[in-house]
Amino acid sequence: METIDKIKKQIEENHILVFMKGSPKLPSCGFSSQVAQVLVNCGEKFAYVDILQNPDIRAELPIYAQWPTFPQLWVEGELIGGCDIVVEMFQKGELQSLITEAAARHPEAE
């Protein structure tokens, strides 16, 4: 249960969080790269967890989230989705407003 507690704490403490392979500057897969780039383009700070460095999270998060793949974008404690959903929302302009509004509600994160 320790890993689940760690996941919950990360989601709770970071209003914009992506669980990904690698880092935004050095992503280790194309899907993680796309999501990181989209988030950078939204212009707000976001946190990330490199699941390749955290095999316990990599194993447990899909069960907790009921979402089998990575990356996973979480905004204000809610799973938004993976690469396809995030990119589609960005293309429609929906992701930018979601991210901007979340950042505005959490100015202490700056």
Image: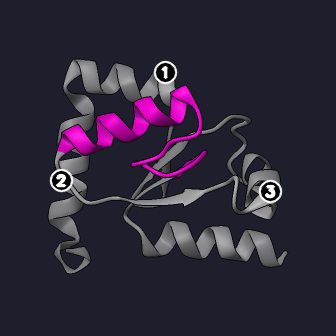
What amino acid type should be assigned to the residue bearing mark 1? Asp
Please check the rendered image and state whether residue 58 is part of the magenta-colored stretch, yes or no.
no
Please check the rendered image and state whether residue 40 is part of the magenta-colored stretch, yes or no.
yes
Q: Which mark is residue 84?
A: 1
Front of the two marks 1 and 2: 1
Q: Which residue is mark 2?
A: 101
Q: Give coordinates of residue 35: x percent, y percent.
A: 42, 35
Say how the picture is coloured.
Answer: one colour
What amino acid type should be assigned to the residue bearing mark 3? Glu
Of mark 1 and mark 2, the one earlier in the sequence is 1
Q: Give coordinates of residue 77: x percent, y percent.
A: 47, 60
From this view, report whether residue 11 is shown above or below residue 9: above
SS label for mark 1:
helix
Q: Give coordinates of residue 101: x percent, y percent.
A: 18, 53
Q: Quadrant of the N terminus?
A: bottom right
Q: Quadrant of the C terminus?
A: bottom left
Residue under the point 51% across and 42% down: 27
Contact (Cβ within 8 Å) of mark 1 with mark 2: no
Foreground pick, 21 / 87: 21
SS label for mark 3:
helix
> Residue 64 appears in which quarter of the rendering?
bottom right
| 96 relative position to 22: left or right | left
